[in-house]
Structure formats: structure tokens, C-alpha cells
Image (cartoon, grey):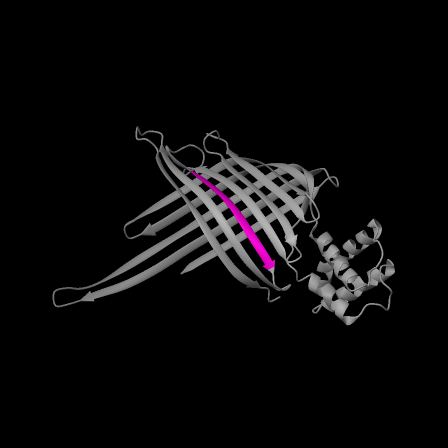
């Protein structure tokens, strides 16, 4: 028998539109297991019963509080608006230049999509109807020009997979405690661990449109324990570039680096500790056969190493290194 319970809560509040903001989050993960095995052995020489009971539980807690500056905005809805305009231009319904105010009015209407999902069981007809009404109100299309085919083309736009496009930048600092408690009992022995460590985290995120079809994003963070931080820090860096080669062909290139270093208590109390580093470079080509069907090809090069240290030993640290190249392809279909 095994059970698991997770609670993850986060909150952020901006004091100004683009400036200082507050960060707070809590994470709790509890898992427990229990097994009871009863066996019997019967023969002319031996007749015995024995019971094998194994039980354990693990509790992890993480609570942080901090502040940051800057803001990232999700520009995916802007690209949905551009897709709608492109399709209506192809249908000959929009034949004139669209100014900034008209585009923003359409984007604002699309931004309320979640309200339609909440208020209506079959939200599509209400959502598309209001989008058409917004386009007519702004004078982009004649009120009676929209036909069923073009309305369906608008709806298809939201089934198209568009990679997240984040614009802007932000930096942050948080301080929090990490707690882990683990206990187990078996017929052969038992054990108990109760660890606590304070962690300082500094990080940042950045997103920038290189062009209408190319977008770059990056994020990085470093976690520093209170003790022995110069050796036992964690570092994570991710960089990605998205480029639309054509209407139905997209390329996503990414690089990631991760360094993790830890011992049992994470606060330098033990002599044994380890360090892991992982790097990977990947390229993904996505070909959209239809709005709901896409063919994906991926090529990944990864390199990893792990080193075990013992501060009280004269033995040279044990290191393990390996690298790999993988290739995969697949066909994805969105049911909803």
C-alpha cells in the first residue's frame, strides 16, 4: 500500500505595473508506504510461519519568500490575433491596413478567452461571434461579410500550436527553508533522517522577439546554501530560440546547463557530498500537417558527469562521465 499527497501554492503581487513585486510559495510532499507479507513453510522437517513488515514515510517541505523587479508578458495571444488577420486577408475579408488601436482591440478580446471557457459549456460559438463583432465594430470587415467558412477558420486558429512567446525581463531574490524527513522500518533494521537547510536563490528571465518569426528566451538561477556555498551551490541555465521557417514548419533550438551539488543535509554537516553536471543541445523540427496534427523530429546531444567526494578520505574523488546523441520522431494529434 502506497499513498502520496502534494500541495503546491505560489503567490506574486506587483506593487507597480512594471516594477517591484513580492514572491511567496510553499511546497509540501508527503508519501508513505506499508507492506505486510505473511509466509509459511511446511515440511516433514520444518513447520513455521513468519511475517515481513516494511513501512516508511517521507516528508519534504519548501517555503520561500522574496522580491523581484521587472515583468514578463505572454505575447502568445498577439500571435493568435495575427493568425486571424492573416486568414481573413487570405479570404479577402480584410483589404485595408490595420492600425495599432484596431489590433489592440482584437488582442484584448482574445485575452478574455478564459471567461468564455468558464461561463459556457460550448464556448466556441459565443467566442467567435464576439470576435467577429469586434472586427466589425473596428471597421475591419463589413458586418454582413463574414461567412461560415471564415468563422470556422477563426476557430481553427486557436487549435494551432503556438510556442509560448514571453516578452520583457525580470530578476528576483528569494530566501527559504528546505526540510526533508525520512523514516523506514524493516525486519532487518530501521533508519531516520531529519534535515533542514536554508537556501538563497537569485534568478532572472528574459524574452525578446528577434523578428516576427523568431523569438529568443533565456532563464537562469543559482541556489546558495548557508554553509559551504562555494562548493555546494546549484546552477541552472536554459536558452532557446524559436523560428518559423514557413507557415507550417517551425524550428526550436535550445541549450541547457544544470549543476547540482549536495550531501544528505545540504548544509555541509557531512563529509560525503556529490556534484552532478548535465548539458544538452537540442534541435526540434515541427511540421504542421494540419492544425491538430504535427510531425516532430528531434536531435539531442547531451553530456553528463558525476563526482563523489569524501572530505576525510585521501582517495581521489570518483568521477563518471558519459555523453550521448539521440534522434527521435513522432506524430502528434490533439484530440481537443
Asked whether, in this view, residue 25 is left or right of residue 51, the answer is right
Q: Residue furthest bottom?
A: 148
User: Which residue is more in the foreground, 190 or 331?
Assistant: 331
Q: Residue 179: horizontal and vertical position, in percent?
A: 48, 42
Q: Residue 153: horizontal and vertical position, in percent?
A: 73, 65
Q: Residue 124: horizontal and vertical position, in percent?
A: 72, 67
Occupied quadrant, residue 194:
top left
Asked whether, in this view, residue 132 is left or right of residue 265, the answer is right
Q: Which residues are magenta?
A: 276-287
| Residue under the image location 66 percent in, 39 percent down | 170
Quarter of the picture holding the N terminus: bottom left
Asked whether, in this view, residue 26 is left or right of residue 146, the answer is left
User: Which residue is more in the foreground, 20 or 93?
Assistant: 93
Q: Measured along the vertical axis of the image, is residue 43 above or below residue 140?
A: below
Quarter of the picture holding the C terminus: bottom right
**232 is within the stretch colored magenta:** no
User: Which residue is more in the foreground, 290 or 114?
Assistant: 290
| Residue under the image location 71 percent in, 48 percent down | 212
Occupied quadrant, residue 23:
top right
| Residue under the image location 37 percent in, 33 percent down | 309
Occupied quadrant, residue 51:
bottom left
Q: Residue 55: horizontal and vertical position, in percent?
A: 36, 54
User: Which residue is more in the foreground, 231 or 306?
Assistant: 306
Q: Is residue 10 visible?
A: yes
Amino acid at each position: 500500500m502506497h499513498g502520496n499527497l502534494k500541495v503546491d501554492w505560489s503567490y506574486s503581487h506587483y506593487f507597480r505595473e512594471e516594477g517591484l513585486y513580492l514572491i511567496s510559495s510553499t511546497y509540501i510532499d508527503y508519501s508513505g508506504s506499508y507492506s505486510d507479507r505473511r509466509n509459511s513453510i511446511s515440511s516433514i522437517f520444518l513447520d513455521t510461519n513468519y511475517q515481513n513488515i516494511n513501512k516508511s514515510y517521507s516528508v519534504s517541505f519548501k517555503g520561500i519568500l522574496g522580491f523581484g523587479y521587472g515583468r514578463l508578458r505572454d505575447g502568445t495571444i498577439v500571435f493568435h490575433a495575427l493568425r486571424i488577420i492573416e486568414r481573413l486577408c487570405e479570404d479577402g475579408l480584410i483589404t485595408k491596413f490595420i492600425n495599432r488601436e484596431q489590433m489592440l482591440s482584437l488582442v484584448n478580446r482574445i485575452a478574455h478567452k478564459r471567461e468564455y471557457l468558464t461561463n459556457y459549456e460550448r464556448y466556441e460559438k459565443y467566442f467567435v461571434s464576439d470576435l467577429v463583432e469586434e472586427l466589425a465594430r473596428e471597421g475591419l470587415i463589413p458586418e454582413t461579410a463574414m461567412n461560415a467558412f471564415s468563422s470556422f477558420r477563426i476557430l481553427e486558429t486557436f487549435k494551432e500550436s503556438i510556442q509560448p512567446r514571453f516578452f520583457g525581463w525580470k530578476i528576483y531574490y528569494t530566501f527559504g527553508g528546505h526540510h526533508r524527513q525520512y523514516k523506514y522500518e524493516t525486519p532487518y533494521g530501521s533508519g531516520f533522517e531529519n534535515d533542514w537547510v536554508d537556501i538563497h536563490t537569485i534568478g532572472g528571465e528574459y524574452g525578446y522577439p528577434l523578428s516576427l518569426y523568431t523569438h529568443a528566451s533565456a532563464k537562469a538561477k543559482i541556489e546558495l546554501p548557508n554553509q559551504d556555498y562555494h562548493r555546494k551551490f546549484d546552477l541552472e541555465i536554459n536558452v532557446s530560440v524559436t523560428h518559423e521557417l514557413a507557415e507550417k514548419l517551425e524550428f526550436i533550438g535550445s541549450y541547457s546547463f544544470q549543476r547540482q551539488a549536495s550531501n544528505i543535509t545540504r548544509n555541509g554537516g557531512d563529509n560525503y557530498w556529490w556534484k552532478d553536471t548535465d548539458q544538452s543541445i537540442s534541435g526540434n523540427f515541427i511540421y504542421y500537417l494540419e492544425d491538430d496534427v504535427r510531425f516532430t523530429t528531434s536531435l539531442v546531444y547531451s553530456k553528463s558527469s558525476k563526482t563523489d567526494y569524501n572530505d576525510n578520505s585521501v582517495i581521489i574523488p570518483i568521477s563518471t562521465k558519459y555523453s550521448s546523441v539521440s534522434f527521435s520522431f513522432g506524430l502528434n494529434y490533439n484530440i481537443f
